[in-house]
Amino acid sequence: MTGTILLIDDDPSLRRVTEYNLSQNGFFVITAASGQEGLEAFTHQVPDLVVSDVKLGDMNGLDLLSQIKKVSAQIPVIIITAFGSIEMAVQAMQKGAFTFITKPFDRLTLIHACKKALELTGLRIQTRLLTHEIDRLTGTQGIVSASSVMKELLETASRAANSDATVLITGESGTGKELLARLIHRSSPRSAGPMVAVNCAAIPPGLIESELFGHVKGAFTGAVRDRKGHFMTASRGTLFLDEIGELATDVQVKLLRAIQEKQIQPVGSEQTARADIRIIAATNMDLQEQIASGAFREDLFYRLSVIPLSIPPLRERTEDIPALAAHFLKKCDAPAGVRFSPDALAQLTVYRWPGNIREMQNLVERCIILRNSDVIQASDLHLPGMTPDRPAFDPVIPDEGISLDEIQQAYVVKALEKAGQNRSEAARLLKIPRHVLLYRMEKYNIR
């Protein structure tokens, strides 16, 4: 087990001897002669392990330990002292030290402690990565349903999972369409089979048919052997077609036939094969507009949207924001005690979130890394178009209560009146996509 060790000791001779012993055992050692120098070295080149004397010229080693843990709770710290006591050992362990070694100590004792600390860190990293991968594959990570609209959506998705009907998931980029698709697959009778995700927008137009249905040797230049397509790879499982709106119309025809007949024909082959799969498609496009322009086939749309699921953008489910903030703090391994201040949460709630859940996760991760204290303030957010002292929208709720639907309906009507019944302008005033405005008008029967 090797790694980078930051050695902090104000005794020059002992520091040189310890550095030599550690280096001889395969560790890369960075040295510092004081607590402040050690903190600066820790900031510029984060080590895998810190070994520090408890008596430093400018700082107490336990105070240094506390500051290191505020920056990164995951990096182990070994405390060394010639003034050992049970009380000091307990205090060091309470502050997060990996272990406590009293001078004089055997050279092998320190080497053994360093190896054990790095081994434990490696296991923790592997466990965390494995946990994240399991969450990613099972589709449970990131779906927070504090709001009624998300709870209703997840209930519908749960019922949909019990059938083999095709599902069409719509929503803006970053809202979690693939996560929902994975949750449906995991909850379905096909969960023992594979879930194959295909980004239709990422495949060159000339290869999409081969990618989906496969090809036989010699079907085209470069086809040196038979190849299974994603329809066959996902056999007895689920095929997730992301960005379905990007498919060319000629491929849409063949996809429609494959879904209807549950048969596929590899490129260059005269034989057909049965495809035992469940189809889930997703798009951030307004497919009704695509149909009107001739870019998407209406018959394929109805075949895909047997069960339509629409994920609302984050700005339309602000009740989820505090829960999501707490979720991402945990997911990004924030040290215990790190939290958002009330002002910061208020600003998160009024922000428009054009990047939705993905943008929020990135923001939380950035705040954890760059924070100045355990309480993340509004001034730490740096949200585009927002200022720390910008007041949050503070609506008045009467004692008898008010329906959220009534509020939304009133604002839609007001926006249409202000825009002279121009729907595109009304959508701009409400800062929502036009198709969302049309959905609200239909929901509230606004003509």
Image (spheres, rainbow, N blue to C red):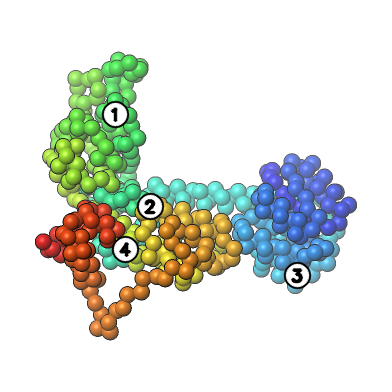
The residue pinned by badge 3 equals 88
Q: Residue at x 75, y 46 (%)?
A: 29
Mark positioned earlier in the residue sequence (1 or 4):
1
The answer to which of 84 and 210 lies nearer the viewer is 210
Residue 436 in view of the camera: no
Residue shown at the point (31%, 78%) measured from the top left? 396
Is 130 left, or right, of 38 in this rendering?
A: left
Crowdedness of circle 2 by 10 Å Cα count: few (<14), some, many (20+)?
some
- Any mark on residue 360, and which? none
- CA separation in Å, label 2 and label 4: 14 Å
Q: Which mark is residue 317?
A: 4
Q: Earlier in the sequence, mark 2 or mark 1?
A: 1
The mark closer to the camera, 2 or 4, is: 2
The image position of residue 116, as x and y in percent, is 68, 51
How far from the left and from the top, in percent, is residue 63? 72, 66
- Residue 48, image x and y in percent? 66, 49
